[in-house]
Amino acid sequence: AQTVTQSQPEMSVQEAETVTLSCTYDTSESDYYLFWYKQPPSRQMILVIRQEAYKQQNATENRFSVNFQKAAKSFSLKISDSQLGDAAMYFCAYRSATRGAQKLVFGQGTRLTINP
Amino acid sequence: EAGVVQSPRYKIIEKKQPVAFWCNPISGHNTLYWYRQNLGQGPELLIRYENEEAVDDSQLPKDRFSAERLKGVDSTLKIQPAELGDSAVYLCASSLPGAGQGSGKQYFGPGTRLTVT
């Protein structure tokens, strides 16, 4: 079974600075998807960024980018120019590309605090 | 485009009472998921539907939990009887047809926070 580990329960950063959240995963599959979700106090899980394992290029979405290291099974999220609205729980998630195996496997989450 | 809708947002019940949660997925999304999120943890899948068929319910505690999606659109998750350990946030998500081979994107609702006293 696949597992996802987020080793940082909490992180904090000054507004406008850059922060990196860590995620590692364990799988024997070669084709899969990786995601970062943001969960603010409203509880709604919001998709931040997605990476396909067969793509070597790291995904980027505006101020959010990932460092995907397939051999090391590492998938970190970098948030540049942090804003107060970025404060939330961040979850790393794995999904197999195998048809019929669509569930997301989540890590334990990292609580990100933005200091003004 | 409307997102995934869930109700109620909050529910407080005494143990041994029944409770039900409702989910309306994004229009056109034939895959629907129910996740449970315990405090301080990531969500865990309870059940996944493809249209009205439950195709993955291996994590659903079938002695007290049940779910249905009769017309392949809205879904209801029920707990009867509830136990103290069922206190959690119950999240519903949906995805487009063919997501098994496609983008893999799941869209979540705001969840229902259940407190069992």
Image (cartoon, coloured by chain):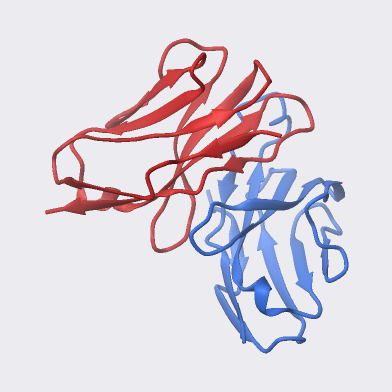
Chain colours: A red, B blue
- Comparing A110 with A100, the one in front is A110
Q: x, y (%) of residue B89?
A: 58, 66
Q: Nearer the viewer, residue A90 or B5?
A: A90
Residue B91 falls in image quadrant? bottom right
**Location of residue A66 with respect to B27 vertically, above or below:** above
Residue A70 position, x and y percent, is 51, 16
Residue found at the very far front of the displayed protein? A7
Q: Is residue B96 above or below residue B2?
A: above
Reply above or below: A63 against A86.
Answer: above
Q: Measuring from the top left, give residue A64's x and y in whole percent.
A: 32, 32
| Number of disc labels | 0
Query: In the image, is A9 to the left or to the right of A113?
Result: right
Residue A27: horizontal and vertical position, in percent?
64, 25
Q: Quadrant of the C terminus of chain B?
A: bottom right
Q: Is residue A92 left or right of residue A112?
A: right
Query: At 62% across and 23% down in the image, what residue appears?
Result: A32
- Of residue A62 and residue B117, the one placed in the foreground of this image is B117
Between B15 and B6, the residue placed more toward the observer is: B15
